[in-house]
């Protein structure tokens, strides 16, 4: 089974312009993500997919592999699919976000391992939430998971609603995805669905079309970089590595 890892990276960011090139202990963030993804075993290729020459050059300077993609993609999935089309021999495509410089190689490996189940088309990651404010924050996407570790629903609202306190855990969705390549190419062509547009959550398109999404529960530390405060925190963590 051939697995490739793709890291989509755009220069534009509303809250943190130029985010992929922000410095983390002397190296651009996108290069930190790339280096950590490269540590994953049994991954044939790691590629940064970008529409910006500055990001492309930064990755090449770091001795990494980057590909220029179209600038008119509406979603990261579209950019991912453009790269996947160029790897017809790949079986699985793993999408690692370019703002996750603490991504664990073992998590990438575990995602790839899920596809030993030949019926599986898509997988992602979640981590348990305990802080009440984080649960209420609509920027933290929540996921409800069934007994077979498949997603029942994703929402920006608090789910499940705690009518009876302490009866169910709350899980935060982490935006790291893995796809069977052929499914990814089909998925990118599916029209947006009602729930997807209502919640502004692209993964709901798969559920609305009847596909299962396997969810790995992880205790890994995730600090996605969206603000200057996040960037400072990640720099402190790297200094202590």
Image (spheres, rainbow, N blue to C red):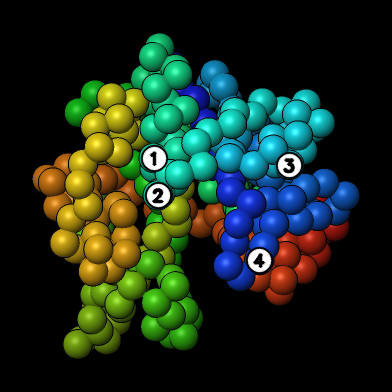
Give the farthest residue toward the left.
Answer: 210
Measuring 79% from the left and 61% from the top, which residue is drawn there? Answer: 235
Measuring 39% from the left and 42% from the top, which residue is drawn there? Answer: 77
Quadrant assignment, res 48: top right
Residues at marks 2 and 4, CA–CA distance in whole angstroms:
19 Å
Badge 2, how many Cα within 10 Å: few under 14, some, many 20+? few
- The residue carrying mark 2 is 74
Give the farthest residue toward the top.
Answer: 89
Give the percent coordinates (x, y) of residue 138: 39, 77
Residues at marks 1 and 3, CA–CA distance in whole angstroms:
21 Å
- The residue carrying mark 1 is 78
- The residue carrying mark 3 is 54
Residues at marks 3 and 2, CA–CA distance in whole angstroms:
20 Å
Give the percent coordinates (x, y) of residue 27: 82, 46
Give the percent coordinates (x, y) of residue 233: 73, 68
Give the percent coordinates (x, y) of residue 70: 50, 36
Residue 173, above or below 75: below
- The residue carrying mark 4 is 16
Visible residue check, residue 95: no
Q: Earlier in the sequence, mark 2 or mark 4?
A: 4
Q: Relative to the observer, which residue lies in front, 61 or 73?
A: 73
Residues at marks 4 and 1, CA–CA distance in whole angstroms:
22 Å
- In the picture provided, is 56 more to the left or to the right than 111? right
């Amino acid at each position: 089974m051939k697995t490739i890892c793709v890291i989509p990276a755009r220069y534009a960011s509303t809250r943190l312009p130029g985010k992929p090139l922000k410095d983390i202990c002397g190296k651009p963030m996108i290069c930190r993500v790339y280096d950590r993804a490269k540590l994953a075993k049994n991954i044939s290729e790691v590629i940064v997919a970008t529409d910006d020459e500055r990001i492309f050059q930064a990755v090449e300077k770091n001795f990494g592999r980057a590909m220029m993609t179209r600038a008119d993609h509406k979603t990261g999935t579209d950019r991912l699919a453009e790269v996947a089309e160029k790897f017809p021999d790949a079986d699985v495509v793993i999408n690692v976000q370019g703002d996750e410089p603490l991504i664990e190689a073992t998590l990438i490996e575990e995602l790839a391992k899920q596809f030993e189940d030949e019926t599986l088309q898509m997988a992602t990651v979640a981590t348990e939430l305990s802080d009440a404010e984080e649960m209420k924050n609509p920027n933290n996407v929540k996921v409800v998971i069934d007994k077979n570790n498949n997603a029942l629903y994703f929402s920006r609202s608090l789910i499940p609603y705690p009518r009876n306190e302490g009866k169910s855990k709350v899980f935060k969705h982490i935006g790291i995805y893995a796809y069977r390549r052929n499914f990814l190419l089909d998925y990118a062509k599916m029209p947006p669905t009602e729930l997807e547009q209502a919640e502004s959550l692209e993964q709901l398109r798969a559920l609305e079309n009847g596909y299962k999404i396997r969810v790995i529960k992880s205790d890994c530390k995730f600090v996605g970089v969206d603000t200057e405060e996040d960037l400072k925190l990640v720099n402190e963590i790297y200094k202590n590595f």
